[in-house]
Amino acid sequence: SQGAQDFLPRRGGLPSLRSAAGGCRGCALYRDATATVFGSGPASARFFLVGEVPGDQEDRQGEPFVGPAGRLLGHAMADAGMDRKMAYLTNAVKHFRFTRDEGGKRRIHKKPSRGQIAACRPWLLAELAAVRPEIIVCLGATAAQSLLGNDFRVTRERGVLLGPQDLPEHNAMAERPEAAPRVLATVHPSAILRAKGEDRTDAYDEFVSDLRAAASEST
Ligand code: URA
Ligand code: SF4
């Protein structure tokens, strides 16, 4: 398949994008997933948070960040003073990617491939153009890869608020200078869920501090 581009509606805002995405066949992921999990939040949102790919719960409910990682994200946003009602939450890839465990019962999340990230990027850019946020927060390497390019390293630049002038030339944000929001990359909330004990507390605190840096920049 050729990517999502051919499925984009010619006109209309978020509702029309959402409904068109329901019929996307831009890559093979629509086949095994239950639902297209489109972004959620107001078109007037100041914050635009980008995850990786919907998980098992998201696939069942058709909404982003409704599972364990989403719960952690919600707490962290509250602790960072980032109003969820002012945030648009979405993913770099809109269909769940998974393998089955040996018994065939549990669906285990798989990272989307580079090709799938690229195939789905037109939806992400269309959401960005519709929302025109002040600040984009990339949650983890996949989101950063989609918007900031394959050379971007979250480990090196996490928590740094980037302006359009700081961005490398060959990335999706540079293709849309009219949108020109600031961008900050941080870890994915599921990385915090994987950490144990004190490491987890530290990882959570750092995550909240990154979100606070984003929240405090918005006017
Ligand atoms: N992880 C993500 O990246 N996105 C979701 O919507 C849920 C979990
Ligand atoms: Fe389309 Fe994205 Fe789903 Fe692939 S993952 S079918 S590009 S919406």
Image: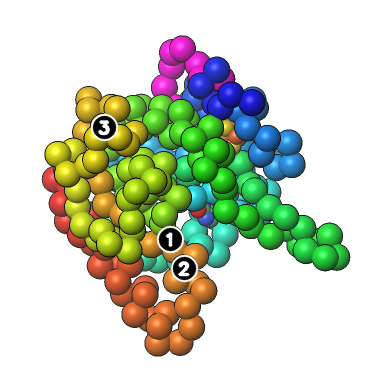
The amino acid type, in three-letter code, at marker 2 is: Ala
Q: Earlier in the sequence, mark 3 or mark 1?
A: 3
Identify which residue is drawn at 45% across, 50% down: 142
Residue contact at pointers 3 and 2, CB within 8 angstroms: no
Q: Is residue 85 visible?
A: no
**Of 21 and 173, the residue lying toward us:** 173
Residue at the far bottom: name it: 198
Q: Earlier in the sequence, mark 3 or mark 2?
A: 3
Q: Provide the secondary structure element on which disc 1 rests.
A: loop
In what quadrant of the picture does the C terminus appear? top left
Residue 138: horizontal and vertical position, in percent?
Answer: 36, 50
**Of 26 and 71, the residue lying toward us:** 26
Label 2 neighbour load within 10 Å: few <14, some 14-19, many 20+: few
Identify which residue is drawn at 24% across, 35% down: 169
Residue under label 1: 188
Residue stretch rendered in magenta on the structure? 7-15
Identify which residue is drawn at 49% across, 59% down: 70
Which mark is drawn over residue 174? 3
Task: Check if residue 19 falls in the magenta segment.
Answer: no
Residue 54: horizontal and vertical position, in percent?
Answer: 57, 49
Identify which residue is drawn at 30% across, 67% down: 208
